[in-house]
Amino acid sequence: MAMKTIALACSAFLAAFAGFGAAQADEITDVRFGEHAEYTRIVIETSEPVEFRAFTLSEPAARLVIAFDQASWGVRSLPTAAGRGVGSVGQFQFDDQASASRLVFSLNSPSMVRQTLSLDPNGGGYRTVVDIAPTSEATFQQTSGFPAPTRTLTDLLMEEVGVAYVPPSCEVVRVVIDPGHGGRDPGAVARFGGGHEKDVNLSAGLILRDLLLATGRYEVVMTRDRDVFVELDDRVRIARQADADLFISLHADSAGDNRSPAGATVYSLNPRAVSRARANAIREGDWVDASRPQEVSQILVDMQIANKEGESERFAEALRTEVGRTAPLWRDQPMRANFAVLTDAATPAVLFEMGFLTNRNDARRLNSEREQRRLMQSALAAIESHFARCGGGEPRSRYIADAGANTVASAR
């Protein structure tokens, strides 16, 4: 897993070794946007003047990063430290868990930093201003990347760890499908005929497995392929053992006695889940080694988590978009949660609530093989879109899960 994660994460890592201080953080009190004909403006208000750097990243998804020497979150209207922008800016999230606090903005189209400003208070706090303007894909690729330090990350890895950055070949993409619940755990109980949640999840999971295998481009692992109970920790362990490229957990929702909620929802990691994934990375010891400088271990952990979080959000957006073409959505925006099955240290992961068994129309769809297939075809389209960059690898396909035993077999 170590070599693979370095290959996936190096281009996405936010260079934690850039020398940020550990002084008391200044508070971010507001984030607002202005949409103009030729550019989008981002204004970040702080309690004190701050040092910052703004740059774009192209991998694993198009993002704008504003990194601070020191900053903490204090925007009362956004208690989850996340929100939505305008124009070229999509979702954004404040991250203070890495070695440098930063705001990370998803980009809806190729963009470049047009100008940055630091302004004194004018009836509010100190203002950090970043203007981004549309650009071509070629220019975006050329200008994106962390501002080069004295030593590149590849240099540092070679010196301290003895591992060079090698771009991923993507010859084989391995997907873990996790049909939620099972065995003694029925999940949401059927209200309008059909099966309980565990049955719906398994049926959909088997359809998705077959669709993936039929392409000849994926290896598939299932946490269960029959009606057995699998502990949450074992589901996470299966993804870890498989060295998976993607983990998708399938569920059907419930609203108790309320029959109104309807539609599908896609969840990626919220900040607490990211913290749990980081703790798992440290506990599992993939990157923490007493024989190397602590700084290097921290860099490697941050690389791993930055890649996992970015890839999870990117796939969640692709899945939500594809599902929305064929089925109703309960929340027409990416959602984030602290689900245990999402917290493997390395594997990008989402939880897909396919609809509500407590809603008559949703229950009818979820118990229809035809509708399940349509839904899983949407999931397949999202997976194909997500891994489009891996095109050209050797076509191969195999099912390698030993479900029930909770281990991953090597049999072809």
Image: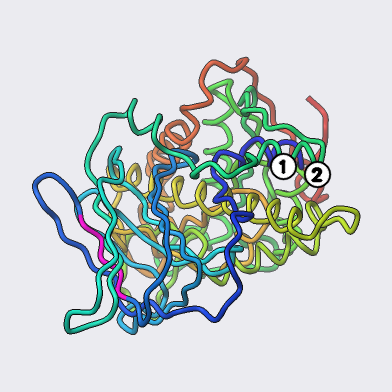
Q: Nearer the viewer, residue 367 or 391?
A: 391
* Start-end of magenta stretch: 41-45
Question: Residue 76 appears at what percent x and percent y?
Answer: 34, 84
In the picture provided, is 234 more to the left or to the right than 261? Answer: right
Q: Is residue 82 at least partly visible in the picture?
A: yes
Question: Residue 131 appears at what percent x and percent y?
Answer: 24, 53
Q: Please name the amino acid that badge 1 sits on.
A: Leu
Residue 364: assigned label = none
Q: Answer whether residue 266 is magenta in the image.
A: no
Q: Answer whether residue 44 is magenta in the image.
A: yes
Residue at numbered disc 2: 160
Residue at numbered disc 1: 156
Q: CA distance from mark 2 to mark 1?
A: 6 Å
Callout 2 touching callout 1 (CB < 8 Å): yes
Looking at the picture, does residue 73 appear above or below residue 114? below
Q: Residue at x 49, y 41 (%)?
A: 60
In the picture provided, is 1 more to the left or to the right than 290? Answer: left
In the picture provided, is 187 more to the left or to the right than 328? Answer: right
